[in-house]
Image (tube, rainbow, N blue to C red):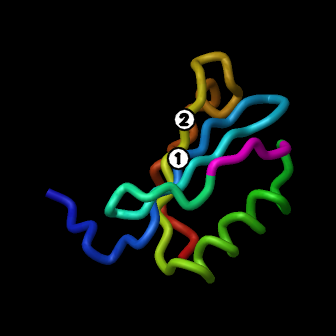
Amino acid sequence: MIDTSDIDVYLGLDVDKGEHHATALTPAGKKTFDKRLPNSEPKLREVFARLRTRHGTVLVFVGADAAHPLMQCGADASGPSDR
């Protein structure tokens, strides 16, 4: 079993070619972020930084459909986090 006691926010990120959608929840289930985001690395990094500043450690879950390039290239989206 994985110890998640040091996780302060869980961020679900649904990626798409055009836009993304992100929803963040605290361990208690309180929604702290729920917005569409542009397909822009700088904007995503801003969201990650803002959540980290406000809440602490963020665990990101990435979801994409099978047609997304991320899924087709065999990338391991579960790799090391950028803490």
Q: Residue at x 46, y 65 (%)?
A: 9
Residue occupying the far left of the picture: 1
Read off the residue under disc 2.
63
Q: Residue at x 53, y 46 (%)?
A: 12
In this rendering, the answer to whether 24 lies above or below 45 is above
Q: Locate the N terminus by quadrant.
A: bottom left
Q: Residue at x 27, y 67 (%)?
A: 4
Pick the residue in front: 24 or 13: 24
Which mark's residue is nearer the viewer, 1 or 2?
A: 1
Asked if residue 46 lies left or right of residue 30, the reply is right
Give the mark nearest the N terminus, 1 or 2: 1
User: Could you say where residue 28 lies in the image, as x and y percent from the top left?
Assistant: 32, 62
Highlighted range, magenta? 34-38
Magenta segment, principal secondary structure?
strand
Q: Which mark is residue 12?
A: 1
Asked if residue 50 lies left or right of residue 66, the reply is right
Residue kind at label 2, given as amino acid type: Gly
User: Could you say where residue 78 lies in the image, as x and y percent from the top left?
Assistant: 46, 50
Asked if residue 63 lies left or right of residue 3, the reply is right
